[in-house]
Image (cartoon, helix red, strand yellow):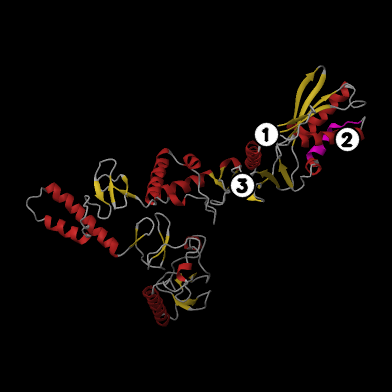
Amino acid sequence: MACESMVQILVVESIYGENVFSLGRWKGLRCFQIHINIDVLGEIAITAKLNSLNQVETVSRSSDEFLYTFKVQYLPPVVLTCLLPKSYPSRQSPIFTLSVKWLEPVKILNLCSKLDSIWAEQQGQEVIYPWVEWLHGSSLSHLGFDEEITLGPYGMNLVQDERVISGAECFDIDIPFLRSYNDQRHNENFFKELHQCNICFSEYAGSEFIRLPCKHFFCLKCLQTFAQIHVKEGTVSNLQCPEAKCTVMIPPGLLKHLLDNTDYERWESMMLEKTLASMSDIVYCPRCETPCIEDEDQHAQCPKCYFSFCTLCRERRHVGIACMSLDMKLQILQDRQNSSQLKEDQKRREREKINEMLSMKEIHRDSKLCPSCDMAISRTEGCNKMKCGNCEQYFCYRCNKAIDPSDPYGHFRDGSCELFPREMVESWEERINHRQAVGQLQAELFPQRGSTCPNCRQFNAKIGNNNHLFCWACQSHYCYLCKEIVRRGTKHYGPKGCKQHSEG
C-alpha cells in the first residue's frame, strides 16, 4: 500500500507540477499539499453587501444596505492538504484539510462535505485526482457562484470541523486581497508574452513594457521619451496615457521611474507653478517672485521679503488711491530717463522696465487674458474657441467667457458669438481665390507641361523641374510622373521611387 501511495503522489506531481508540495512524513504517513486554481470562464463578478458605514464606492439598494461589485479573472487558489493513511485507498479515505483565504467557513465546510461524497461514491479507488478536478472545475457552481460570488456574512457561522481553514476576515481585508491577487496574476501572464507597443509598433517581451493604471501599456523606451519631451517643452498637463481618447494621468511614482532626477525636479516645479496658477487668490511678489495670498482688497504681503503691494498694478500698496494705468506709469518712467539726477545703473534698470511694459502693452493689445489663470493668449488665425496652454481652460476669444470643456462648441450654438470671425472667413476666401487665380493662370500659360489631379481631375501646370504638384482645387499633393497621390514626399521620391526633379 505504501508503494501504491507513493505512485499516486508521483502521478499527482506529474499532472499538477509546481502546484504540488511534498511535506514529508507525519507519524510515518506521507503528507503533501496541492494549490488548486479555480476555473473562471472570462471574468466573474464579486459582490460585497455593505452597510452605510463602509466607506467604499457603493450602489444603493436600500436605506441601510449597499452593494460593492468588482470583476476578477483570477481567484486565489484552494489549498488541499492530504495525509495518506496506510489503508488508503482500500478502506480509508485521505485525511485532509481545505484552506481558502477568501471564503467563509460554512462554505468551505460545504466543499468538504462534497469531497466526502465523492469518496463514498468511489470508495476503494484513488480519489485525489477526482477531488482536485472537482475543486478546479465545479466548486464555484456547487456553491451557487456561477455568475457572481457574494462575500460574507462574517462572524456568523461557527464551524467545528477541523478540516475547515478559512482566511476570510472582513471586507476591508478580503476585497484588497482579491483585487491584488488578480492584478498579480495578470502581470505574471503579461510578462510571459510578447506584446506590440502602440507608439513604435515594435514587439517586445512583457518585461520591457510599462502598464499604466488604465491597463494600457507601452514599451519603456517610448514612455521615457514621451515623458522627457513633455517635461522639456513644459506641457506637463499632457503627461497622460498616450492611448487615443484616454485621459488617465501618469502617476508621480511612475514618472520618477521614467525621468532622471533633474527632469523629475523640473516636473515637480512646473506642477507646483500650474497648481498655484490655477488658484484665484495666488499672486507673485513683484520683487522676489514668491507666491503670495491676495486679500479681498487686492493687496498682498510677501512672506519672504515682506513687501506689501497692490495686486492690480503690482506697485507699493496705496490705500485709497486709484492704480495708475500702464500708459501713465510708462510716461513717468520715460520722462525720468532724461533726468540728470539718476545714476546710470538705475537708468538701465528703468529702461529694462520700460521695455517690459512696452512688451506687456503690445501683448495686451493683441491678446485676451484666460478667464481662469489670466495668461495672455493671442490668436493668429482660426476659430473663436480657444484653449489655454497653461491651465487648459476652454474660452471664447470674442466674449472672453469660460466654456464648458465637455461641450466646447455649445457656446456658439445660440448665435451670440460667432465660431469663425467674419474677417477671418473673408481672409481665407481671399487666399483661396488668389490660389485659384494663380492656378488657372499657370494652366493657361503652360498647357503642355502639366497633368490632371488624380483626385478631382483638375489640370495643374508643372512649374520648373519640380515633379511634385499641388492641386489648387482640392489641395491634394500628387506626382507628375506616376500620377499618384503623395502622402509623404520623403517616401515617394528617392533612389527607389520617382525622381522629384526632371526635365519635361
Q: Quadrant of the N terminus?
A: top right
Q: State the CA–CA distance, disc 3 to disc 2.
A: 46 Å
Q: Residue at x 76, y 28 (%)?
A: 33
C-alpha span from label 2 to label 1: 28 Å
Q: List the residue tagged with mark 2.
A: 117
Give residue 313's position: percent from left, percent from top: 25, 55
Q: Quadrant of the C terminus?
A: bottom left
* Numbered disc 1: secondary structure: loop
At label 2, the amino acid type is Ser
Q: Name above or below for residue 405 compared with residue 229.
A: below
The residue sitting at 53% across, 74% down in the picture is: 455
Q: Which is closer to the viewer, label 3 or label 2?
A: 2
Q: Give the magenta-colored segment's residue range.
A: 125-136
* Residue 149 location, quadrant: top right
In the rendered image, the residue lying farthest to the top is 27
Residue indicated by mark 3: 195
Point out residue 279 in the picture as x, y percentages from the top left corner. Answer: 38, 50
Left or right: residue 161 versus residue 220 is right
Q: Nearer the viewer, residue 319 or 186?
A: 319
Secondary structure under the numbered disc 2 in the rendered image: helix
User: Cα distance, mark 3 to mark 1?
Assistant: 38 Å
Q: Nearer the viewer, residue 422 or 479?
A: 422
Q: Earlier in the sequence, mark 3 or mark 2?
A: 2
| Label disc, if present, on residue 169 of the rendered structure | 1
Q: Amino acid at mark 3?
A: His
- Left-right relation of 185 to 427: right
For the residues bearing labels 3 and 1, Cβ distance under 8 angstroms: no
- The mark lying in front, picked from 2 and 1, is 1
Q: Quadrant of residue 438?
A: bottom left
Give the dominant element type of the magenta stretch: helix, strand or loop.
helix
Nearer-N-terminus badge (2/1): 2
